Structure formats: structure tokens, C-alpha cells
Amino acid sequence: QVQLVESGGGLVQAGDSLRLSCLASGRSFRSYAMGWFRQAPGKEREFVATVSWSWSAGTTYYTDSVKGRFTISRDNAKNTVYLQMNSLKPEDTAVYYCAASSRGVITTTLEEYDYWGQGTQVTVSS
């Protein structure tokens, strides 16, 4: 069992930066791939970024709209995954969710994630 608690959301202006954090509890954390998803009002939840079970292996993947602006990382010693968001745009406004996948390797599909955080609101003004 893995429990995820997110933090770091807020209200910012376009061009600003935020770092989201997701603290995980559970002894199997190191074996899980981690992902970030987001959901804007009236839209489906969409994939943002994922990192494999081993951060040292350096396996990450991003959706096209955030490439070059967002960075996902993890610190297994701290049981934490991060999403560094730079050059934020109004279209980034959404509730952001972290998720854990027992699959262990990167995946972009919601169905392959087993655990989800409660979500944290990110609002970017023009």
C-alpha cells in the first residue's frame, strides 16, 4: 500500500515557477514508477510526466506541452517525487495529481497507476 500527499500548488502569474512535491508512505515506494497528471475544469485527466522506479537510471517522459518547461524527479531516500514547473502558462491551470505505478517503468496511461494523491490546485493568471 502506498499513500501519496501532495503540496506546493498555488496561484502564480504567467512566467512564474512552482515546485510540486508528493510525499509517499509505504515500504514499496522505491519499486514504483511515479507520474504526474492534471485535470482542468471540463476536461479529462491528462498525463503530464513520469519517472521510472530508479531515478539514478534517468528514465523520464513528458507530454509535449510541458517539454522543456517541467522536470520530474524523485528522491527515494526521502520517499518524495517532485514536479518542477517553470515558465508557467495560463493553460497549465489545473488540479495536479501524483500517482504511483507498480509497473515500475514509465507509463502515460491512467489505468496503469495504482495509487493517487488528493490533488493540488495550480492556477496561472495572465
Image (tube, rainbow, N blue to C red):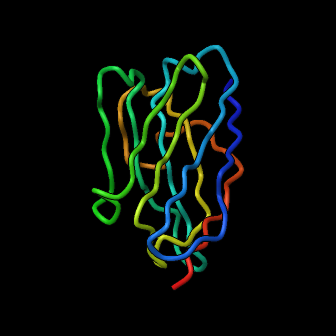
Q: Quadrant of residue 28?
A: top right
User: Between 10 and 5, which is closer to the camera in this rendering?
Assistant: 10
Residue found 45% across the figure and 68% down from its top: 88
Where is residue 80 drawn, in percent x and y? 58, 30
Where is residue 114 drawn, in percent x and y? 57, 36
User: How many numbered marks are there?
Assistant: 0
Residue found 71% across the figure and 40% down from its top: 5
Left or right: 13 in relation to 103: right
Where is residue 47 drawn, in percent x and y? 43, 55
User: Between 30 and 15, which is closer to the camera in this rendering?
Assistant: 15
Q: Farthest residue in the bottom direction?
A: 126
Viewport quadrant of the N terminus: top right
Q: Where is 88 relative to 73, above or below?
A: below
Q: Where is 107 relative to 8, above or below?
A: above
Residue found 65% across the figure and 70% down from its top: 11
Q: Where is 7 relative to 95, above or below?
A: above
Q: Where is 24 relative to 56, above or below?
A: below
Left or right: 84 in relation to 71: right
Q: Quadrant of residue 125?
A: bottom right
Where is residue 21 drawn, in percent x and y? 60, 42
